[in-house]
Amino acid sequence: MARLTIPVRYRGGVSLIGRLDPTSAEAIKNTLDAVFAQHDERSSSTSLEEAVSNAIPKVPNLSKSDLRTIIETLLSLYGVRAEREVSLDRFVEEISAAHESSDSGVHSGGEDRQRFQSNLATLLSADVFGLAAKVVDLRTDDERLFCHARILTDLRPVFGPKIEDGPKGMIVVHLLKLGYHDANGKHSEFYVALDSDDLQSMKKLISRAEEKARSLRSYLKGTRLFGLGEE
């Protein structure tokens, strides 16, 4: 398995985690559990802001900016752990080694390493991360995963018997370009030709799917729903 490296944008958050005292680390974990355990339909960005706001009184020695950095770093780290499918203890050791080898890393051995690993294990054991991993796993458990789409519109000339007389008309053709990732993560694309009637059919299908999502949201009040977006 490849050795981990910590991206520059997250090194500050990892360093902050290492400097936390155990009480603060536990307080942040409890805040994450409390906010993300609520059965609501808010976006992850809103929940993140609430987690930061709720944590401020419990961790008074950290600024709002630092708390946000720590939580964003934790979300990223857990995503890496879920992808690597390793135990929490093993992952904490890998991140600790990567942290020590970075420019902002802790000194080798001793209390610094022990405190960092303890804080990271505490924070990554928050219930939200286990739930997020399951959501990602179920959401991506398909043969192909949508990546992007684009519709290209072309004019194709229609010639008569004499080409030198120029085109007698034009046909409007829409090409739907669909990009996706297969089960192995390979990116591929394919094209589908559409006419105006096809576009109308797709609009109706999308509207119907959105209506189903709204119906589910109303029917399953009290149950946290993922993948439905916001009203």
Image: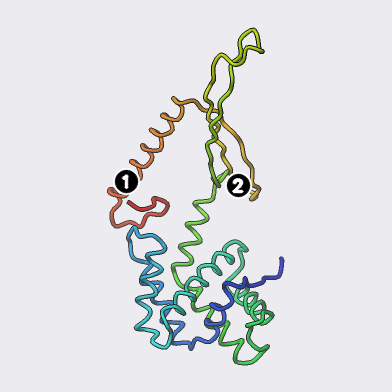
Residue nearer the viewer, 177 or 98: 177
Residue nearer the viewer, 190 or 152: 152
Element at label 1:
helix
- Amino acid at circle 1: Arg
Element at label 2:
strand
Asked if residue 23 lies left or right of residue 218, the reply is: right
Residue nearer the viewer, 183 or 60: 60
- Amino acid at circle 2: His
Q: Which mark is residue 129?
A: none
* Earlier sequence position, callout 2 versus callout 1: 2
Residue located 38% across and 33% down the image: 204
Q: CA distance from mark 2 to mark 1?
A: 28 Å
* Most distant residue in the front direction: 165
In the image, residue 65 lies at what x, y percent? 44, 78
Asked if residue 1 lies left or right of residue 130, the reply is: right
**Badge count:** 2
Q: Is residue 29 above or below residue 75?
A: below
* Most distant residue in the top direction: 161
Residue located 53% across and 40% down the image: 150
Q: Which mark is residue 181?
A: 2
- Disc 2 crowd, CA 10 A, few/some/many (<14, 14-19, 20+): some
Asked if residue 4 lies left or right of residue 169, the reply is: right
Q: Which mark is residue 214?
A: 1
In the image, residue 148 lies at what x, y percent? 54, 45
